[in-house]
């Protein structure tokens, strides 16, 4: 089955490659990564700072289900409009390290486009930890909900 | 192939999955692991034993305490981690697509 989103994470590599095709013109896809109000809508994060220019920096924040604040930040290394963004990304006060992200935007047709997102981590271990995060969050959130229910019933 | 089957059996159980997620964040003693559950120490010990036998967890003696940590080689067997990761991005991209579609129609 052809999936719209693909993830390649080979053993013993420091990177993850994510590809996705969109029913969107490449200009709109690119815009989704460069306009703070739009980023807020689809990332579900608050954008505290977003200075989209070469060597400009950005900061996002979000809350986990327990209400703890999680902040992220990074720097725009370089970009080519409608083609490429190279930036760093880091979760603050967490042991997951900083990552280098290379976004390549490709026009497929007038109305469709493809995104190639390479993420390079500090080490194979950091890569593996980051890869496992959604799996762990899924479990932890389920666990927290269960905990909440158990606490209430006491 | 025997190891692989064992690994999947090990992570099929929700309690064992929770243990994996706890230990993935930091090495823990059996007592510290058990504190997260309402089950008896024996039940949790049994789960830890299974995870150790499947080489997902590794024991490490630190002073008088035994700590369990994730065996990174054991975890490599589990392509299953990729699917939650892919799902997260798929959901995120679907959101992006719908946000941009309504943005486009507003213009």
Image (spheres, rainbow, N blue to C red):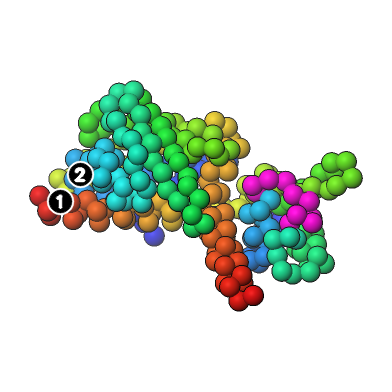
Residue situated furthest bottom in the rendering: A153
User: Badge 1 is on which residue?
Assistant: B104
State whether residue A77 is above or below residue B61: above
Using the rendered view, name the quadrant where residue A71 is placed. top left
Residue B60's quadrant in the figure?
A: top right
A29 relative to A6 in the view: left or right: left
In the depicted structure, whether residue A61 falls above or below residue A73: below
Tag 1 near tag 2, CB within 8 Å: yes
Report how many numbered discs are placed on residues in the image. Answer: 2
Q: Quadrant of the N terminus of chain B?
A: bottom right
Percent x, y of residue A54: 30, 23
| Residue B91 placement (x, y as % from top left) | 37, 56
The circle on residue A28 is 2
Q: Which residues are magenta?
A: B24-33
Residue A25 screen position, x and y as percent: 18, 45
Q: Which element is circle 1 on?
A: helix
Q: Position of residue A9 (x, y in %)?
A: 51, 43
Q: Residue at x 50, y 50 (%)?
A: A68
CA–CA distance in space, label 1 to label 2: 8 Å
Residue occupying the point 34% across, 23% down = A55
Query: Does the magenta run of residues contain A97?
Result: no
Magenta-highlighted stretch: main secondary structure? helix
């Amino acid at each position: 089955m052809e999936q719209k989103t693909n993830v390649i994470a080979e053993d013993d590599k420091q990177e993850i490659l994510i590809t996705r095709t969109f029913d969107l013109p490449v200009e709109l896809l690119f815009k989704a990564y460069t306009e703070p109000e739009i980023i807020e809508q689809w990332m579900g994060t608050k954008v505290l700072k977003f200075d989209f220019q070469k060597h400009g920096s950005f900061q996002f924040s979000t809350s986990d289900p327990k209400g703890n604040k999680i902040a992220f930040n990074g720097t725009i290394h370089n970009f080519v409009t409608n083609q490429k963004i190279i930036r760093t990304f880091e979760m603050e006060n967490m042991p997951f390290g900083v990552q280098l992200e290379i976004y390549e935007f490709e026009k497929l047709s007038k109305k469709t486009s493809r995104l190639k997102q390479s993420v390079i981590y500090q080490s194979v271990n950091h890569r593996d930890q980051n890869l496992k995060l959604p799996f762990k969050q899924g479990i932890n959130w389920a666990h927290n909900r269960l905990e909440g229910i158990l606490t209430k019933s006491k | 192939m025997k190891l692989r089957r064992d690994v999947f059996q090990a992570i099929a159980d929700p309690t064992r999955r929770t243990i994996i997620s706890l230990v993935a964040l930091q090495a823990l003693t059996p007592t510290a692991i058990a504190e997260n559950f309402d089950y008896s120490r024996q039940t949790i010990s049994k789960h830890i034993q299974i995870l150790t036998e499947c080489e997902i967890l590794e024991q490490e003696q630190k002073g008088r305490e035994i700590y369990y940590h994730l065996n990174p080689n054991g975890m490599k067997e589990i392509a299953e981690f990729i699917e939650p990761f892919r799902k997260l991005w798929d959901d995120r991209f679907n959101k992006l697509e719908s946000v941009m579609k309504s943005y486009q129609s507003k213009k």
